[in-house]
Image: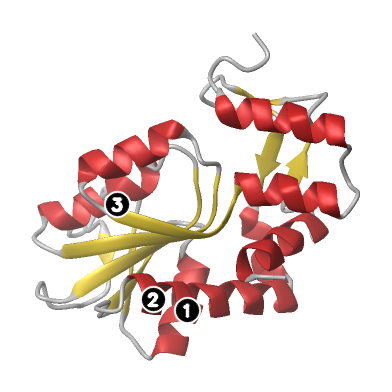
Amino acid sequence: MNTQQQIASDLLKIDAVTLAPNDPFTWASGIKAPIYTDNRITISFTDVRDHIETGLVELIKNKFPKADVIGGVATAGIPHAAIVADKMDLPMIYVRSKPKDHGRGKQMEGSIDKSQSIVLIDDLLSTGKSVLNAAKALTDEGYNVIGVVAIFSYELPDSRQNFTEAGIDFATLTNYSTIIEQAQSEGSISEADLATLRQWRDDPWNWGK
């Protein structure tokens, strides 16, 4: 089992990912989706957490070897960033969703030099807007964001387009395609369910209409 399959299996095992091809969820965006993800619970499972943090370290070393700083995107990315920064012996920062409305109005917490290269960590990528907003907040202040890593990606076409437009590269430990294939191989969904789930991946915004 490779890393993508291992993380996919882990997320399914702890119910961080729920697949419901015949009873879809409605996301806040209004999109109908046969999947719901709550990667926040991964921090409570020591074996899963270890697989994730070890995987993120390797992903950063391979994809962004010039990283000087690990950044967590509030709130779900912060615990993973803390552990990864510790494993890599690198400084850590975190980025709020918006500036504080009191004090110095800071959006970034931590102390780093603007010449240092930052990799941001989030728990999952849908359209990528939240982590890209965090990246923009940093770059607007003169900091250097060289990439984004996350546990999981829905593989929405909007995500790749948004990252391309922002000029920022990204990588994830696993993704929607791997999750549904792993679920089928483990027997938790049928071949018919798998076909339905693939249809959503191929046309998520029009699926189920």
Q: List the residue tagged with mark 3.
A: 134
Whether pointer 3 and pointer 2 mark residues with C-beta atoms closer than 8 Å, the reply is no
Q: Please give the name of the residue rendered at 64% of the width and 79% of the height, measured from the top-left corner.
A: 50
Give the residue displayed 26% in from the left and 48% down from the top. Answer: 101
Report x, y in % for residue 103.
21, 59
> Which residue is tagged 1?
58
Q: Nearer the viewer, residue 91 or 111?
A: 91
205 displayed left or right of 188: left
Q: Identify the residue at horizontal 78%, vertical 29% (top origin).
A: 21
Q: Secondary structure at mark 3?
A: helix
Q: In the rendered image, which quarter contains the N terminus?
A: bottom right
Q: Secondary structure at mark 1?
A: helix
Q: Is mark 1 in CB contact (under 8 Å) with mark 2?
A: yes
As drawn, is 119 to the left or to the right of 174? left
Disc 1 crowd, CA 10 A, few/some/many (<14, 14-19, 20+): some
| Residue wearing tag 2 | 62
* Residue 12 drawn above or below residue 56: above
In the image: residue 44, left or right of residue 158: right
